Amino acid sequence: MTTRSVVGASSPVGLRLLHAAVFLAMAAGVLYVAVPEWRHVLQVLGQPFHAGPMPRWLLLAGSLVAAVGVVPLVWGLMRGRSAPLWASGAVLLSLVGAVGAGDGRPLAEARSEESANLAVLRVGRRVHLSMVQELQAHGGAPIDVESWRKALELAGPAPDRIRTRELRAVAPQLVWLESDEDSAEPLVPGSLRVHVTPDGVAFSIRLVGLRDGEPVLLRDDRGKELVLRGLFNPDLPPAEKPAVSPIP
C-alpha cells in the first residue's frame, strides 16, 4: 500500500520550528527593507509634488507577497502543523523581488528635497552664466522668450528630479515675467522665472524648488529670496562669444 503525504499533517517539532524560523526570518527581512519604500508611497500620496525617482514596484510587490506567505506559516506553527508549500514559495519569491529591486540606500538622497533644489539651482546658474556672457558680448541679453528656452534646454536639466502625485515627471520650464515683481503665474517646481528689461541690459532669474511637497521660491542662506541677476557693465571689455555653448 502506497503512503501519501497529507498537506497540513504534523511533522517533527524541531523540523517544523526550524522551517518556520528560516522562512519567517526571510519574510521579516523583506518587510523591513520595504518600510522606507512604503513611507515614500504615503508621502507621494499626501503631497502635490515630491522629489526623486519612481517607487520600487518590485520591492513593494515582494513585501505584499511576503505578508501573504507569513500568514499560513504562523498559522501552521500555532496549530502544530506543517505550512503549505506555496507559503514557503511565496516567501522565496518575495526575497527574489527584494534582491531584484536593488540597493535602496542611494535613493534616500535622491528623494530629498534638498537634492532636487540643488539640481534646480545648478540649472539656474548655468542659464545665468550663459546669459551674462551674452549680455557682455552684445551689450544686452536676448529679449525673446525662445532664446531663453533654448538656453534652458542646453543647461541639461536633470530628469526625474520632481514628480507629481500621479508620478508624472515635471519638466523644467521657463516662466516669462512682464515685470520684476510679477507673481501672477502659479509656482511650478523646477521652473525658472525670468524677467528681462525691454532694452535687454538687465535681467533677473528666480528659481522654484520644493519645501514639504509644495512649490516655493528658493532662498539664500540668509533666508532672503534668491535672485540671479545680470546687468550690462560698459566698463568691462566685451566678452568674446564662445565658439561652443558655455553651458556644460
Image (cartoon, rainbow, N blue to C red):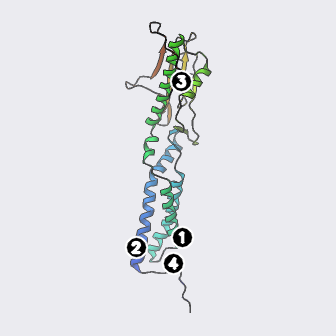
- Determine which residue is flagged by label 3: 245
Identified by mark 1, the residue type is Trp
The answer to the question of whether label 1 and label 4 lie on touching residues, with beta carbons closer than 8 A, is: no
The answer to the question of whether label 1 and label 3 lie on touching residues, with beta carbons closer than 8 A, is: no
Identified by mark 2, the residue type is Leu
How would you rate the neighbour count of disc 4 (Cα within 10 Å): few for under 14, some for 14-19, many for 20 or more? Answer: some
Q: Going from the N terminus, do you reach mark 1 or mark 2 first?
A: 2
Q: CA distance from mark 1 to mark 3?
A: 60 Å
- Residue 245 percent location from the top left of the image: 53, 24
Q: Going from the N terminus, do you reach mark 3 or mark 4 first?
A: 4
- Residue 165 percent location from the top left of the image: 56, 41
- Determine which residue is flagged by label 2: 18
How would you rate the neighbour count of disc 3 (Cα within 10 Å): few for under 14, some for 14-19, many for 20 or more? Answer: few
- Determine which residue is flagged by label 4: 8
Q: Residue furthest top?
A: 235
Identified by mark 3, the residue type is Ser
In this rendering, does residue 52 appear at all?
yes
The answer to the question of whether label 2 and label 3 lie on touching residues, with beta carbons closer than 8 A, is: no
In this view, the residue in front, 240 or 10, is 240
Q: How many marks?
A: 4
